[in-house]
Image (cartoon, grey):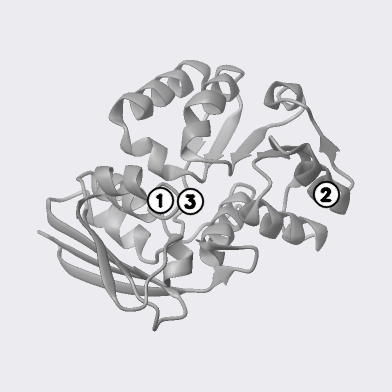
Amino acid sequence: MTVGIVGCGAIASIITDFALEGKLGVDLKFFYDQDLEMAKKLSSKVDGITVPTVHDMLDHVDLVIEAASQQAVGKIVPPILKRGKDVIIMSVGALIDPELKNHLETIAMETKSRIHTPSGAIVGLDGIKAASIGNITEVNLVTQKPPESLGIPADKETVLYEGKASAAVHKFPMNMNVAATLSLACKMETNVKIIADPEIQHNCHEVHVVGDFGELRTTTQNRSCNTNPKTSVLAAYSAIKLLKSLNENSRIGT
């Protein structure tokens, strides 16, 4: 499988390092970023090809990883799907918009392409998806991050937001992909609380789900990427695991 990547920041860098070590299971070959120098830097690690536009890779790839931004999803993903190519969407927050989500799914159905969304920076998503087969009545997410991870100054614990996932995603587009992923998995909008805490060292996500299956609680403490404190290493690992699973004959979990 030949893969291209759009957006050559922290997540793309981790994925590329795994490709360099031969641990990816696919041929990561094409790279695009608005900053072409960033794309060239990453592509040179794996003897890849830097392209001036996303369209220039579509004749040569089977799948494209979107690792750019929520704003980019609506622009670059429809043309990818229209060409019958599969896509992994890292900026899952964009899919909180039901109109865009339905639009992308309609194109994918017409072209027999596939849209993949990794589990991202939280654990337990397989169980939550299984629980969604029944009736889920309550979904809560409490996210605590160091202030620098949220891009703000704070010298004490501060609640920055409390409300629904859709508003949280728009207010904190670089930090709340988790809220969107959780909402999509549960098939209902998540209640979100975001806290900046200068006393903690990790990005922490506490999930609480209640339904006819029973009750589920998870806590994930993530190490941030060295190059971008807003991005958790686990988010990149989830994309790598998804890529590897596409070529596996035996799978564990949904």
Q: Is residue 28 visible?
A: no
Is residue 238 toward the left or the right of residue 46 in the image? left
Q: Quadrant of the N terminus?
A: top right
Q: In this figure, which residue is indicated by the disc labeled 2?
A: 41
Instruction: Using the image, tell me which numbered label, if any, was put on residue 177.
Output: 1
Residue 130 % position (x, y): 28, 55
Residue 30 % position (x, y): 77, 37
Q: Classify mark 2: helix, strand or loop.
A: helix
> Hey, what amino acid is under mark 3?
Pro
Label 1, residues with CA under 10 Å away: few <14, some 14-19, many ≥20 = many
- Residue at point 48%, 33% (across, down): 71
Residue 156 % position (x, y): 32, 78
Q: CA distance from mark 1 to mark 3?
A: 11 Å
Mark 3 or mark 2: whose residue is earlier in sequence: 2
Q: Is residue 206 visible?
A: yes
Q: Classify mark 1: helix, strand or loop.
A: helix
Q: In this figure, which residue is indicated by the disc labeled 3?
A: 118
Q: Is residue 148 above or below residue 6?
A: below
Is residue 165 toward the left or the right of residue 42 in the image? left
> Hey, what amino acid is under mark 2?
Lys
> Hey, what amino acid is under mark 1?
Asn
Identify the image quadrant of residue 131. Answer: bottom left
Depth order, front residue of 105/1: 105
- Residue at point 32%, 38% (across, down): 96
Q: Classify mark 3: helix, strand or loop.
A: loop
Is residue 197 toward the left or the right of residue 226 in the image? left
Mark 1 or mark 3: whose residue is earlier in sequence: 3
Mark 1 or mark 2: whose residue is earlier in sequence: 2
